[in-house]
Amino acid sequence: MYIEEVKPEMKLPETVRIFDTTLRDGEQTPGVALTVDEKICIARKLDSLGVDTIEAGFPAASPGEMDSVRRIADLDLDANTCGLARVLREDIDAVIDCGADYIHTFIGTSPLHRKYKLKMSPEEIIDRAVFGVEYAVEHGLRVEFSAEDATRTEFDYLVGVYRAAEDAGADMINVPDTVGVMIPRAMNRLIRGLRDEVRTPISVHCHNDFGLAVANSLAAVEAGASQVHATINGLGERAGNAALEEVVMALITRYDLPLTIKTTELVNISEFVSKITGVRMPPNKAIVGENAFAHEAGIHVHGVLEKAETYEPITPEMVGHKRRIVLGKHTGANALRSKLQEYGIDMNEDQFCTLYEQVKRLGDKGKRITDADLRAMAVTILGKA
Ligand code: KIV
Ligand code: ZN
């Protein structure tokens, strides 16, 4: 209702492409290193999920990366296989050697990157960017160009960089919020501004340093960005990247955008990636966390059992999750009755009251009552009768 009222103010694209960077930026999560076989398994799952592009790695970084990108490109997936490259001949050659059909090439543009990292003048950076894009285009690659640290780059200079990349043949202009410094309103204004200056489709790549990566990505889409970079479970450098599962579900259900993603696979791939990387999700992680569709409070459980939408914004089935009724000190009688029914346990009213008291007493002590605990308690009470 409220969303419909603000939609006319937005410049929503017809659809949004999902560029997955779990295997590249996601693998830059401290402590995570995937084997080639693990990367291949994840790439297959991402392809079945329906992402548009898989950034499979940074071929120039190591022989292992080279091998992973080559092997993923050989799979001939429906998704584009993309390799990352600086705007350097040797990096671009490495992507070409892998047989990838898509390149994501970048150079830092902010004053900090120019002065301290690259030690190059603004003009030299533009020349380098043009060289990289032209070289990749000449070699038959589809080219996505990123101005690294775009969100801390002077707007007029940024426009100059992107226009040069566009004229050199870039197919997509990506706007990285490299250290996650944006806020949604500023991101929206930046993308609107860029859209007025460049013709090429715009993509965003948001980091989560202030917990705003998903919000900033959505703000960019509201301004007309037609591609979002994301990672499964929000993996990535430091606080990570925009979480794919959150971006996707918001785009589909809040903005009504038609995406090609098979949302019922989201929990499955989240669990798979979590297991392989060893990065566990907090239980309250949106969409895929263990508690994302769990209800404990009596009032909530009562509502959900009557009509799920009262306390669920989307169905758990939509993302391949399951609704869970959790027992604890907030449990109401309805929830307990529904659990007993689920297990086919019949009790008279006295027995039920005893069980209910026991659940509350344990809950008050902060105990988590599992389904197995509940069954054991019920059997004991029934045995005493
Ligand atoms: O965050 C970033 O700026 C990147 C670049 C490689 C585009 O990941
Ligand atoms: Zn990044």
Image: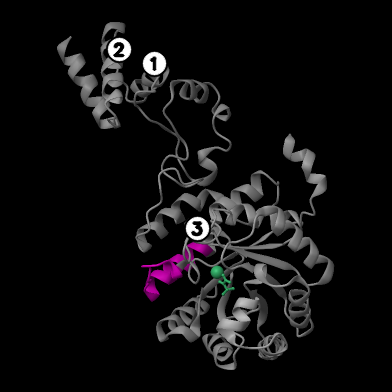
Q: In what quadrant of the picture does the N terminus appear? A: top right
Q: In what quadrant of the picture does the C terminus appear? A: top left
Q: Closer to the camera, 188 or 325?
A: 188
Where's residue 243, x and y in %? 53, 56
Kind of residue at badge 1: Ala
Q: Provide the secondary structure element on which disc 1 rests.
A: helix
Q: CA distance from mark 2 to mark 3?
A: 44 Å
Where's residue 231, x and y in %? 52, 61
Around disc 2, counting alpha carbons within 10 Å, would you say few (fewer than 14), some (14 to 19), or many (20 or more)? some
Q: Earlier in the sequence, mark 2 or mark 1?
A: 1
Q: Nearer the viewer, mark 2 or mark 3?
A: 3
Q: Provide the secondary structure element on which disc 2 rests.
A: helix
Identify the magenta region: 27-46
Q: Residue at x 80, y 64 (%)?
A: 193
Q: CA distance from mark 3 to mark 1?
A: 38 Å
Q: Provide the secondary structure element on which disc 3 rests.
A: helix
Q: Please tell me the numbered disc located at residue 234.
A: 3
Q: Which residue is mark 2?
A: 352
**Image side of residue 204 versus residue 6, left or right:** left
Q: Earlier in the sequence, mark 3 or mark 1?
A: 3
* Quadrant in the picture for residue 141: bottom right
